[in-house]
Each structure stands twice: as structure tokens, then as C-alpha cells.
Amino acid sequence: MFAYILRRLWQMLPTMAGVVVLVFLLFNWVGGDPSYLLAGKMADAQAIANIRTQLGLDQPWYVQLGIFVRQILTFDFGNAWSTGEPVAHILSTRLGPSLTVLVPLTILETLIGIALALAIAFVRGSLTDRLVMVACTVGMSISILVYIIVFQYGLAYKLGLFPVQGWGDHFLENLLRYATLPILIGLTVSVAPTLRLFRSFVLDEVGQDYVRTARAKGLSERRIVWVHVLRNAAIPIITYVMANLPALLIGAFLLERFFGIPGIGREVILAVERSDFPVIKAITVYVAAATMVFNLLADLMYQAVDPRVQLK
Amino acid sequence: MNQMIENLSPGLWALAWRRLRADRVAMVSLAVVLLFLLSVLLSATGLVAADWEDEVAVNYAPPGFVGPDPALAALARPSLPAPPNAFDPLASDLSELKTELARHGKTTQAVKASTLPFGADKWGHDIVKKTIKGGQTSIVVGLVAALVAVALGTLFGAVSGFYGGKVDDLFNWFYSIFTSIPSILMILTVAAVLQTRGVLTIVLILGLTGWTGPYRLIRAEYIKHKAREYVMAADAIGASGWRRMFSHILPNVSHVALVQMSILVVGFIKAEVILSFLGFGVPVGVVSWGSMLNEAQNELILGKWWQLAAAASAMALLVTAFSLFADALRDALDPKLK
């Protein structure tokens, strides 16, 4: 097990190196010289030269790449260009609000998705099944923007059921007061695609021999679906949920932006708007690393769910 | 001879078309998609909605079925000549000027409509025309970007799957890099780096970041096909690697590319709408469904819901039809997947 984890971590290195090089190329080569951007409109040659020295842009490329790698390893990306706030501080303070929304959202989404998918799999091929699938397709076709705009206007602004936006200092206040509507919208948007996907996972299982055996020995349909099928369908479900967690961190950026939640996603949008390169670079690299680690965690969880899986 | 040709078994595409034709949902959604494409074509050639920027109605004119807004309708009436103002020494000169101008017949003080079939926006643009024009941008971006992504994915997947070995390792390395960065973050990062805003920029951003899905599937198909007899036969008669890859194998895997493309179009239209909404997409002055939603967001608070409704329902209708069609196409081309 330990050897397996070590080897997987070792295999991540080339990919991680590729991500670092890709981000480096994007910002240092494709993006051009940021010192003109930083110096503002009234820049003189001296000011630009100073900024270039400060950023290390007058160094050869391999020194610049070295600086970048050191920044990643020491978690020290310097200060954000727009606000002067240390990037490490931005990341650590924005993570909490993001997770306050994302953790409940992911848990609820997964549970609702599983319950609905199993219920639908019961009646597969029926009119109900087809209607639910069409409803899912229609629901997925409406832009998330429309859901957010309409829900925020209707439920928060018109009816006053939720605060229109805002964020407090206490976890419970945030979770129960400010995060409720974003979570609700997130669920509305994500249940349809999740249900479609989980349904296909479940349908892959219901045709298997062990289901026929279970039926033959007289188990109730309920027990077959909720115990036998669910355990087997759990593997692709875990893969999907785990692999999507880091992406969700960014994917919730629209919710965070509309509801004024000071999370990672909103920070990415602000950084793109302000051309705040250090913040974007840091977030991209760390989210990529998190994606790889979560993929590994998903593989480790397989074994917990399914003892037949051998990690080699 | 004719008899023989008629007895040939139908090809993959003919079979798929036959299956599609039997699927009523697929045919209806295909019709809707074609209708949207027709509107894109007509608006791109300037036959329809070329004059969407004319201010044909009062600001925020409501849709016809709601009825005119009394407050706005008052503004729409051509203003009566004001009573001569005793305190304005220029009043007589002004009215003289006005009659002079009117005589030349150049002042087209058209009466602005107080309602339009689906209302008007802040400047009095016709929402129907604006939605068609916005659809043109969003659909073209989605289609072209999907074309770029599928072309790249097919090329990489073909080379990688066909040659295998070191080449395959290299492309798999690229694949692992691109998939470890969530696509929306990748898109935003590239948008941040490319400072220019433009339709071409979004197409490039979406196209260059979206090739991973088609790559994975096309590569798998090439690995499967390269060992088949027809490819070996082509090798035996001396066909070059590229010839085997693109004139022998490609037609046999092109249905995978087509299905991937229909899936990507949907995703890219949604992505373009979000990017343009945030202001990272189409430049100012170009209308897309995303920029319409951006305007509509503020209008909703004033109670002007029609622009939001128009852009949102046009997009939802197209995406629903396109998704249903993509599903049916996948089932028709690959019936064993069902």
C-alpha cells in the first residue's frame, strides 16, 4: 500500500512538471512582458527597468523558471499585483468560504444523485424514466447564469427568503444564512447532470450476473438495488465525485461572484479582470496538484469500497 | 448489375440515418437545430437582423402581449411644439430653424413604437433581432471552436494511437497535463494571458483547451483499428503511414469525431455565454447571448424581464435540441452503446 502511494506520487512528477512548464510558458512567453502592464500608463524607461529587475524578467529563461519553481515549493508567490496582499494569504483565507459552500453542496448532490439514480433505475425504460431524462436534458440546457439571476432575484430580492448577498465572520452564520441559497442553486444546476451520469453507472450494473443471482435466491428488489447494485456502482461514482472536487473549487466561481462570497473562484475572476498574474499562476498550479492528489485518493478509496480491487 | 447494387448492405451512415429517421425526438430536435443554423446563416449574410442596432422603439418597450407601458408611451409620442417661451430669446430662431429643416425633409423623426413583439432593450433595440444576432455570435463560436478542438483531438489521437511508443507517451503526457487543470480554470487562465478580447480569441481559447475528450476516444479507436485486416492490406500495397491513418482509418472512426463534436458544441456555447457574461468573451459592441444576459441581469431589478427571457429561452431551446440530437446521433451511430 505504502509502496503503491509512493510510486503513484513519483508518477505524478512528470505531469506536475508539465503543468509548471505550461503555466510558465503561458505567462512568460505567450503573455508577453507584464512590466508594461504593471508600470501603468505613465511609465518611463527607468520604472519599467526597475520592475523587470524586481520580477526577474531581465534574467535568462532558466533562471526565471527556477524562480517560479521555488515560488511553488515555498508557497511564496510574493504579493498580488493589484492589492499588494501576499498571495499565500489570499489562498489560505479564500479557501474557507469556498469550502463552506462546496462541502455541503457536494455531499447533498451526491446523496440526492444516488437516491434518484437508484429510484429511476427501478423503473428503467418506463415513461417516468424517459420523462425524467428529458427533464434533465432541458434542465441542463438552461445556463447556470439564468438559474442564478432568476433565483437571486425571485427568492432573495423579491421574496426576501435569503440575503441577496453577503458574508459574515462566523462559520455557522455563513453556512445557515449566506450559503443556503448558493447551495440550493448549485444543487438545482448539478442534480440533472449527476443523475444522468449516476443512472448510467447503475444501469451498467443491473444487467450483471450477480443481480440475476440475487434475484434468483429471492432477495427483494429493494435489497438488490440498495445493497448489491449500489456497492458496485460506487466505484465510478467515487471516481466522478473525487475527480470533480478540485474543479468544483473553481466551478463555483459564478455562485461566489453573484453572492459576494470571498472564495477561491471569485478570486480567480477578480485576478483575471485585474491581470493579477501571480494569483492566477498560484491557483492554477495548486489546483492542478490537488486534482492529481484527489485522483490518487479516489483510487485508494476503491479498495475500501471493493475488496476485490488490488492496488498495484 | 443494378440488381447487385441494390442488394448491397447499407453502409454505416445509411444505417445511422435510417435509425435517426425512425426516432421522432431526434428528427424534431434536428429540425430545431437546422432552424437555428438557418437563422445564423441569414443573419451572417445580412438578410435578417442586420438592422438590430436601430432604435426602433422607446427604451425598454415591453413585449406586445404585455401592452405598452403608460409611462414610456408618453415619451414615445412626438413632442408637441412647446409654447413659445417668453424667457428664451432664441425660441423664435429655433422654431424657424426647425421649420427650415423640416422643409428639407431630411429629419426622419420616426414615431418610436411603444411595444414590440418581444420588447426592446435599454436603447430601444428590437429584442427579437438582437437575440438572432446574439445567437449568430454564440452559435458560430460554439461550432468553430468545436471544429478546432475535434480537429486537434483527431490529429493527436490518430498520431498517438497509430504510432504508439514514444509518440504515444508524449501525447499522453500532454493529455495528463491538460486534464489535471480543470477546463474552466484553463480557459480563464488563457483568457487572462491573452489580453485581446475578440471572437477569434474565444474560439482559440475553447478550441485549444477542449481537445482532450476527442483525443482520448479517437486514440482508442486508432489502437483498435490499426491491427485490422484492411489496414494491413493497405500496408501490403504500400500505403504510407499518413495515408493509412487518414484515408483508410479516419473514415471508419469519423463517427466518433462527429459525436464528440456535437457534444462539444453544446459545452462551448454554454462556455461562451459565461465568458461573455463575465466580460472575458466577445468585445464591446458585439452582441452574444452572454452579453445579453449581462445586460438583462440589471434590467431584471427594474422589472424588465423580456431580454433575459428571450436570450435564456433561445439558448435553452437550442441547447436542448442539440443535446437530444447528439444523444440520438450517438445511439444511431453506435447502437451497441445504448
Image (cartoon, rainbow, N blue to C red):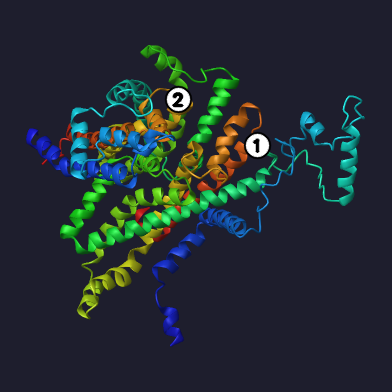
Where is residue B260, by image quadrant? bottom left
Where is residue A180, by image quadrant? top left
Q: Which residue is mark 2?
A: A182
Q: Nearer the viewer, residue B119 or B125?
A: B125
Q: Which residue is mark 1?
A: B306
The amino acid sitting under disc 1 is: Trp
Is B160 rendered above or below residue A5?
below
Residue B110: x and y in percent read 81, 45
Is B285 rendered above or below residue A165?
below
Q: Are marks 1 and 2 on the same chain?
A: no
What chain is tagged by disc 2?
A
- Quadrant, the C terminus of chain A: top left
Where is residue B187, by image quadrant? top left
| Residue for point 71% across, 36% down | B59
Q: Is residue A122 visible?
A: no
Residue B276: x and y in percent read 50, 41
Lateral position of residue B274 relative to residue B42, left or right:
left
